[in-house]
Image (spheres, rainbow, N blue to C red):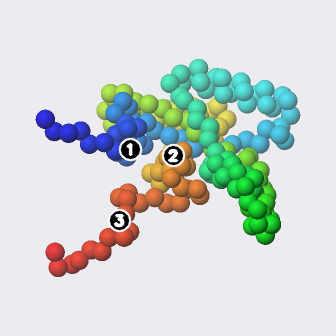
């Protein structure tokens, strides 16, 4: 009996990227990036309207899922480490540097705390490509009709989202399709 390959991909059920999004072991998922609305500048009536639009959208497309995530990595573990170091460090010069690092991390985190990314996702269990395409178009139209600015995410955008979610990229830098590919030398005489 062949030993099953253990990998992060198989652990999370990820199989591959598709024309429409991501294929997992349970479903194919298409993602729509939603342009956030700054509700702090809206009146109470406008906020109520936005909520009503969202409720109507979710009743129109009941399988639509909402994902809210930070658009960059959190620095909590770094701050905890620096704080622990501060407690045991005896050298005053090093303590000043650690305090500056802690203040810098606080500042960055507060600047990024409002950097949220909102995503609509729709899962497909057994549909064929043509059916998926038609549903995606209907969902896209419904999102727009209900007052949300959204667009289907591209492969690089999905890769960035996954990298941030799984903590493999602080800034969401472009991730290659094959890990380590940039370090490989290809010989033309093969």
| Res. 8 mark | 1
Place of residue 53 in the rendered image (x, y in percent of width and height, measured from the top left): 68, 27
Counting residues from the start of the chain, the first of labels 1 and 3 encountered is 1
Q: Is residue 39 left or right of residue 129?
A: right
Q: Is residue 38 left or right of residue 183?
A: right
Q: Is residue 133 visible?
A: no
Q: In this rendered view, identify the residue nearer to me: 67 or 87.
A: 87
Q: Quadrant of the N terminus?
A: top left
Question: Going 62% across and 33% down the picture, which residue do you hit?
Answer: 145
Residue that label 3 marks = 181
Mark 1 or 3, closer to the camera: 1
Query: CA separation, marks 1 and 3?
Result: 18 Å
Q: Is residue 67 visible?
A: yes
For numbered disc 3, what is the local secondary structure? Answer: helix
Place of residue 95 in the rendered image (x, y in percent of width and height, measured from the top left): 78, 63
Residue that label 2 marks = 166
Contact? badges 1 and 2 (CB < 8 Å):
yes
Counting residues from the start of the chain, the first of labels 3 and 2 encountered is 2
Query: CA separation, marks 1 and 2?
Result: 10 Å
Counting residues from the start of the chain, the first of labels 1 and 2 encountered is 1
User: Picture quarter containing residue 34?
Assistant: top right
Relative vertical location of residue 186 with respect to residue 122 in this rendering, above or below: below
Disc 2 crowd, CA 10 A, few/some/many (<14, 14-19, 20+)? few
Q: Is residue 115 left or right of residue 11?
A: right
Place of residue 109 in the rendered image (x, y in percent of width and height, measured from the top left): 73, 52
Contact? badges 3 and 2 (CB < 8 Å):
no
């Amino acid at each position: 009996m062949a030993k099953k390959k253990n990998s992060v991909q198989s652990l999370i059920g990820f199989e591959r990227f598709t024309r429409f999004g991501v294929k997992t072991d349970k479903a194919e998922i298409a993602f729509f990036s939603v342009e956030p609305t700054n509700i702090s500048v809206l009146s109470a009536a406008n906020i109520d309207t936005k909520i009503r639009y969202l409720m109507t959208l979710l009743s129109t497309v009941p399988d639509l899922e909402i994902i809210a995530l930070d658009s960059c990595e959190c620095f909590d573990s770094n701050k905890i480490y620096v704080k622990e170091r501060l407690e045991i460090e005896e050298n005053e010069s090093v303590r000043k540097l650690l305090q500056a690092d802690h203040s810098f991390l606080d500042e960055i985190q507060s600047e990024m705390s409002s950097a949220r990314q909102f995503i609509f996702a729709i899962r497909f269990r057994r549909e064929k490509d043509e059916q998926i395409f038609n549903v995606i178009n209907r969902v896209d139209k419904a999102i727009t009709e209900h007052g949300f600015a959204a667009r289907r995410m591209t492969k690089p955008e999905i890769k960035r989202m996954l990298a941030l979610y799984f903590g493999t990229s602080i800034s969401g830098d472009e991730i290659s399709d094959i890990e380590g590919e940039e370090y490989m030398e290809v010989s033309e005489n093969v």
